[in-house]
Image (cartoon, rainbow, N blue to C red):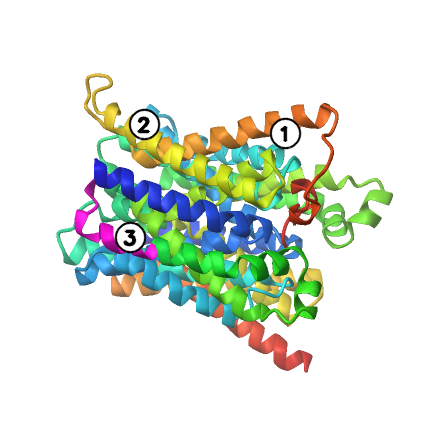
Amino acid sequence: MFSGFMVNAWTVATIVAVIAGVVGFFVVLRGSAFPAHAIPNGAFAGAAAASVIGVNELLGLAVCAVAAAFGIGALGRRGRHDVATALALVVMLAFGSFFLSRSTEYEPQLYSLLFGEVLGVSTSELLPVAGLALACVVAVAVLYRPLLLSSVVPEIGDARGVRAARMEGAFLVVLALATAMTVPVVGALLIFSLMIGPPAAARSVTNRPLAAIGLSVAFALLTVWSAIALSYLTDWPIGFFVGSLAAVCYGVGRLVGASAGS
Amino acid sequence: MQVALVLGAAAALLSAVVGLFTVVRGQSFAGHALTDVAAAGGSGALLVGVDPVYGFVGFGLFAAGVMDLIGVRRLRGRDLATGTVLGAATGLTALILYFDTTSQATTGATQQILFGSIFTVNASVLPLVIVLSLVSLVVVAVLYRPLLLSTVSTDIARARGVPERLVGVVFLGTVSVAVGLSALTIGAILSTALLVGPAATALRLTTRMARALAAAAAIGIGSCWVGVLLAYDSYYWGSSHHGVPVSFFIVMLVFAAYLVSGRLDRARRRAPAPTASGRAERLPEPAAGVRGSS
């Protein structure tokens, strides 16, 4: 389980879990679960387009995820926010299916992009993923205080000169970068689980932001590691384990929170 | 071809009507979550060997019940509960699709369930589809008044003795039927387009409920039919004989309508406002609706 090609899988999955835990904390705090679900689908379209044109997949993922983030922001400025998100989501999915229908190996690729395939990570892909992860962590560290302020009390943030709209944009870009590198591992449809389940559980256990981020990273690591191990042992897709373990995290967190609160 | 047109019309009509309430109630995310659950049902039906439509609709109805139980109605934490159901259902879809492709020789299951395959729908399910959509339309018609009231103002509805929870559950049930039918048409994860797109477009064009219903139905059916025709034709475009997916055209048409309606809406706002009449039927302005919904 720990030999040869599996080493890459463990490394990438660990990076992904740390990023998902950190970024997911803010997703849960800001209540932007729906955008967090929509942006990875833009990344899906990007990966599909990249495979048709024949450029680097990670580049396609990053460019399209950031474009999706800006698109959602622009559409959401007029009209209802959730409607704009829903429409952006389906448009990007449709583009993804269109691009993939141009390529010859349609079906297996579609499946692995949507539901993830942790075993197919090569050593040359490790470095860019690690670089992107570092960029994300630095961005969150720099934005930490203003982002926290504008997430919790946007009014005070405004008064202190932290523009809520600009923060929203910056956060969506960070979210986009984070999803760009996670799509190849857990798939476009399931990153979202990882960004919701563990942080929500951490939030119901503690109220202190730093402790919550730490816990959420720990839960995410636990989820991903068990998912890889189980997937290796049973030969079932990793997406299934990530999705259900994240749901378990959420359920347990809610139970613990309820018993602590009463 | 005819099967595709009839099926598309039934799915688009029901989705447009139900979608209007979904949008006004700010439940787009819940509607989208139901589509992913329906995907698990559809792929499960393939595994057992029955027509996907039973899986889509059956699982959707079940999920509507579950989501009500774990508290999707409460505003606080609603997104997280919805998202958790969504994530778990997607994981399940991944597993079942994996079984579909490995244990049986159903190639193309991923494509068929997630992105739809209107041309391969069996004509024998057509009566079921029509009956399901008629029943759902009747249910919406019966619920119309209480649903509208509890949508616009929960407090007034409660004061009038509207059984709010019951209305909410039955409504989610009709949403899941609508989503199941459009999952047959444009695929499970794209059926949100038919649910939300035409309704949001119509609400930008008019704020009167009856007119919005008519406009949403027209836009939905229109994009469905044009999309089917374009996809049918696209097989002859170019030399490669690669058809373009139907769902791609339908989603693009729905999205184009939404963008155009935004232009019209802005142009109308600049023009002097017409005198308001029939105020009782008016809905809240789109921009003043639920933002962020969390």
Mark 2 Cα within 10 Å, few/some/many (few <14, many 20+)?
Answer: some
Image quarter of residue B222: top left
Between residues B245 and B105, which one lies in front from this camera angle? B245
Image quarter of residue B177: bottom left
Tag 3 residue: B129
Mark 3 Cα within 10 Å, few/some/many (few <14, many 20+)?
Answer: some
Q: Position of residue A225 (x, y in %)?
A: 42, 62
Mark 1 Cα within 10 Å, few/some/many (few <14, many 20+)?
Answer: some
Tag 2 residue: A52
For the record, the magenta segment spans B119-132
Q: Locate the C terminus of chain B by quadrant.
A: bottom right
Q: Residue at x 24, y 28 (%)?
A: B232
Of marks 2 and 3, the one in the foreground: 3
Farthest residue in the left direction? B105
Pointer 1 and pointer 3 on the same chain: yes
Q: Position of residue B256 (x, y in %)?
A: 48, 28
Q: Return the chain for callout 1.
A: B
Q: Is residue B43 shown left or right of residue A162?
A: left
**Amino acid under label 2?**
Val
Q: Residue at x 36, y 46 (%)?
A: B11
Q: Is residue A26 shown left or right of residue A130?
A: right
Tag 1 residue: B265
**Amino acid under label 3?**
Val
